């Protein structure tokens, strides 16, 4: 097993379900390339913003500050790489509505601390893990340039997932964490497996598939 395969194997164990084949089939359609890359850029930008927001909110947690600072820098570098690739492919960075995925997960976050931070970190771990899993699903099927780029992201996305999860583990006992992970895995599976009206990087299958 290669290092990349080992990374993805651990991600698959963490996630509640695989990405539906129907989503992959739509993602690989040539006419979806612009949407895939624009939404990917948006995801990288939002991930950096989330990390910075956590740094502003939890200034007394030195481990979190260091992890999120590094994560934000990496996400912004990925954003720059995506928009460079878009420019090379003559894809304009046009406005694109967000999928219901991240919002659907964040609806489950508790309002009071420390529950709010624990839940936010779990959501971050799930989003990063799902991104990693989808990069791995798409990379072998894309053109070489884009496929190589997506393969190159696997290691950092897997580390981001681990960083979020380890931070959550430091704030909750094992039983509490397991309970919250089960809850958010259930939310995540519902969002990933149910049909969506528009294709996005984190959407469910598009159309009538269930």
Image (cartoon, rainbow, N blue to C red):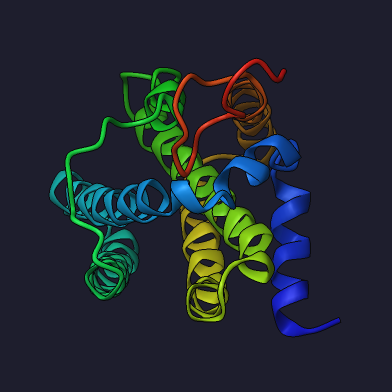
Foreground residue, 113 or 78? 78
- Does 39 sit above or below residue 48? above
Residue 170 is at least partly visible in this image? no
Q: Quadrant of the N terminus?
A: bottom right
- Does 208 sit above or below residue 82? above
Left or right side of 200 for 52: left
Foreground residue, 31 or 203? 31
Location of residue 101 in the rendering, given as x and y in whole percent from the top left corner = 45, 29
Location of residue 132 in the rendering, given as x and y in whole percent from the top left corner = 57, 59
Residue 135 is at least partly visible in this image? yes
Q: How many marks?
A: 0
Left or right side of 207 for 50: left
Q: Could you tell me which residue is drawn at 63 percent across and 38 percent down?
A: 23
Location of residue 49 in the rendering, given as x and y in whole percent from the top left corner = 20, 50
Q: Quadrant of the C terminus?
A: top right
Residue most extreme to the bottom: 2
Q: Could you tell me which residue is drawn at 56 percent across and 73 percent down?
A: 143
Location of residue 36 in the rendering, given as x and y in whole percent from the top left corner = 42, 50
Q: Could you tell me which residue is drawn at 69 percent across and 57 percent down?
A: 11
Residue most extreme to the left: 56
Foreground residue, 127 or 180? 127
């Amino acid at each position: 097993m290669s290092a990349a395969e080992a990374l993805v194997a651990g991600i698959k164990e963490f996630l509640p379900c695989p990405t539906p084949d129907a989503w992959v089939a739509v993602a690989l359609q040539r006419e979806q390339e612009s949407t895939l890359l624009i939404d990917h850029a948006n995801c990288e930008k939002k991930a950096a913003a989330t990390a910075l927001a956590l740094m502003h909110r939890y200034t007394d947690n030195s481990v979190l500050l260091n992890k999120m600072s590094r994560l934000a820098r990496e996400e912004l570098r990925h954003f720059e790489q995506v928009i460079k690739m878009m420019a090379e492919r003559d894809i304009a960075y046009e406005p694109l509505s967000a999928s219901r995925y991240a919002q659907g997960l964040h609806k489950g976050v508790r309002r009071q601390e420390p529950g709010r931070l624990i839940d936010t970190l779990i959501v971050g771990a799930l989003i990063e893990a799902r991104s990693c899993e989808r990069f791995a699903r798409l990379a072998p099927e894309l053109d070489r340039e884009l496929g190589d780029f997506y393969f190159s992201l696997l290691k950092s996305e897997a580390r981001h997932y681990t960083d979020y999860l380890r931070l959550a583990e430091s704030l909750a006992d094992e039983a509490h964490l397991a309970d919250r992970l089960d809850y958010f895995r259930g939310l995540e599976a519902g969002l990933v497996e149910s049909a969506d009206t528009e294709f996005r990087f984190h959407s469910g299958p598009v159309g009538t598939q269930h």
